[in-house]
Image (cartoon, grey):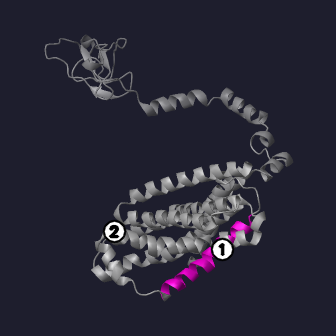
Amino acid sequence: MEIRCPECHAVYQIDVSKLSGKPTVRCGKCQCRFCIKLPESSQIEDVVPIALFIQEYQPKSKNPSNHVAERSNPLQEIVKKTKTLVTKESANEIINDFKEINFKEEVFPVDSMSILTIKNDFVFWSALILGIMPIFISTLNSRELQLTTFALFFASIWGLIFKRYIIENTDGWALPVIGFFFTGIIGSNLLLFIYNLLPDFSTLADLAEKNLIVSFFRYITLVGIPEELCKIFPVIAYLCWKRKNASVMMLILIGIFSGLGFAAFENMQYANTFAVAPLFKIIKYGHTDLRADIKDAMISVMLRSFSSVFSHAVWTGIFSYFIAIASIIKKRYTALFIIGLCMSSFAHGFYDWSCDIQIMLGALLTGFSFLLFYIYVIKLRGMVSE
């Protein structure tokens, strides 16, 4: 008689003449015990029910479609392998392997030579600072101090990338850092002071919400031009200070760091706005999806922390490029200054305008701005070499 194990579905051939009643059998594959219902026509003698007389395992068919796939007991396999591995001989072999390992060389290979190599390894220190600095920042007691330090940290990452890999400048950090903090602290606050002196443009803002063309020119004239003029001031100051001895690549780098500083300190102000935005929505509209509002605020902070500083650096870098060209050819100062202002202000205003419509347009514009700036740097590097 052919029987099938109800657990693993293994198929066997048994001799029913040696069984009677409802005998209990044990599967030779998964050790499952189960009863067999014998045919009523069987004429067999009484035997011990627990006895199991099984021929060699024979599958019913080699075609997997005709029967359920064979399964093994995972726990049984693990126990079996463990018993095989954990023997006296294997244990001694493992102990001997541990004795042969040179832990000083393999596990803790720190010596004076490796320390000296790492000491001057730029990649190591960059990765280390990038990985652990946020943890140190989170230990600061004041939330305002944490917010400020995070803003500076994200901007400094882009500063490092621009200086080391894009501009490839090996000069000191003093002048770029001065430009960074001058624009971030003095320039941005001076710009806010000037904005407060200007007439009330609330009517224009209301009109801009209804008319895309008005909104476009508003972003360029009231956002792009003032902010780009604010950020270019350290570049002009450096050029006036050094005059003929000004380094063209340092001029570009100061412009980039000025843009980073402006964006970093601007992000601190926006972060406070994003933090209270969900509360204002509740006050204005009543019940809202507070969880969604908080997530929107978190996304906005991350977006400005990583992408906004990059965009500002690129726009000011474009403006600085045209000033650098003028310093090389020693003519057309005013014309090139105006072109640089128009290029950077247009990109800046168009980005802000496009983000109100479809943020993907802003991403594409930022990508194109960086492409243009990168080509400018390549061209400028060739001019300096000549």
> Which span of residues is magenta-colored?
173-196
Q: Position of residue 386 (x, y in %)?
A: 73, 48
Circle nearer the viewer, 2 or 1: 2
Which residue occupies 56% across, 73% down? 229
Callout 2: helix, strand or loop? helix
Which residue occupies 13% across, 13% down? 41
Residue tagged 1 = 181
Mark 2 neighbour density, 10 Å: few (under 14) some (14–19) many (20 or more): few
* In this rendering, position of residue 48 left or right of residue 274: left
Tag 2: amino acid:
Ile
124 to 183, vertically: above or below: above
Q: Quadrant of the N terminus?
A: top left
283 to 220, vertically: above or below: below
Which residue occupies 48% across, 74% down? 270
Q: CA distance from mark 2 to mark 1?
A: 35 Å
Tag 1: amino acid:
Phe
Residue tagged 2 = 213
Q: Is residue 187 magenta?
A: yes
Q: Is residue 102 magenta?
A: no
159 to 30, vertically: above or below: below
Q: Is residue 152 visible?
A: no
Query: For residue 216, what is the image quadrant?
Result: bottom left
Q: Position of residue 201 (x, y in %)?
A: 39, 83
The earlier-in-sequence mark between 2 and 1 is 1
Callout 1: helix, strand or loop? helix
Mark 1 neighbour density, 10 Å: few (under 14) some (14–19) many (20 or more): many
196 to 386, vertically: above or below: below
